[in-house]
Image (tube, rainbow, N blue to C red):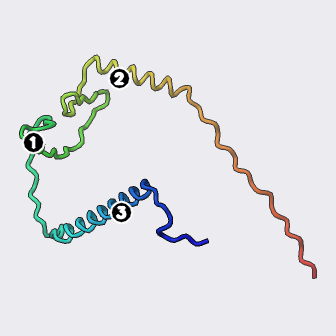
Amino acid sequence: MLLQFGAVRRSPEIVVLVVLLLIMMAGVLWYVLDRRAKMRAAPPAATQTVTPALKPAPGPAPLARPGGARPTVLTPRGPVEIPDGKTLDFSTGQAVVKDSPEDRAKLAKALKEMEEAAATVTFDPLPVPKKDPPVKVPPDKP
């Protein structure tokens, strides 16, 4: 039995969903085409001029500036040398090497706790891999 296209009753939910799907597809297509056009209109990255970043002021950088201005970009600094038995303090936003009796006592306590914890750690030996028995090949009959 053949049904004619007009004879089938379409539910309103399906019609609404199909219309929404078509609108979404048109929106995505428009966005992609618009984005491509903007990318083609922009000059290549090799021809764009870039101004160098300003050297930041010493001290911690503010999170936000009044008027919505962008914060200064901090340049990475070199590594901080830490002599044995000293600690690093980042509470001011800068790496400060400290060496106080309290810090040395805390460091000694932490080292002792780590050594005690590591003393009870053991590892099982690696299992010996099982070898497959050799395959016996019957001799060829002449």
Look at the numbered disc 3 and give the secondary structure of its residue: helix
Mark 2 or 3: in front is 3
Few, some or many residues within 10 Å of mark 2 (<14, 14–19, 20+): some
Q: Quadrant of residue 141?
A: bottom right
Residue type, mark 3 in image = Leu
Vertical relation: 7 (above or below) 53: below
The residues tagged by marks 1 and 2 sit, at their Cα atoms, a distance apart of 43 Å
Mark 1 or 3: in front is 3
Q: Earlier in the sequence, mark 1 or mark 2?
A: 1
Q: Residue furthest bottom?
A: 142
Q: Which residue is mark 2?
A: 107
Quarter of the image where the C terminus is located = bottom right
Q: Are marks 1 and 2 in contact (CB under 8 Å)?
A: no
The image shows residue 43 at horizontal and vertical percentages of 15, 70
Identified at 26% across, 68% down, the residue is 33
Vertical relation: 21 (above or below) 116: below
Say the numbered circle drawn on residue 16.
none
Vertical relation: 121 (above or below) 103: below
Q: Is residue 52 left or right of residue 139?
A: left
Q: Which residue is mark 3?
A: 22
The residues tagged by marks 1 and 3 sit, at their Cα atoms, a distance apart of 40 Å
Q: Nearer the viewer, residue 30 or 69?
A: 30
Residue type, mark 1 in image = Gly
Q: Is residue 93 left or right of residue 141?
A: left
Q: Is residue 123 left or right of residue 35?
A: right
Say the numbered circle drawn on residue 68.
1
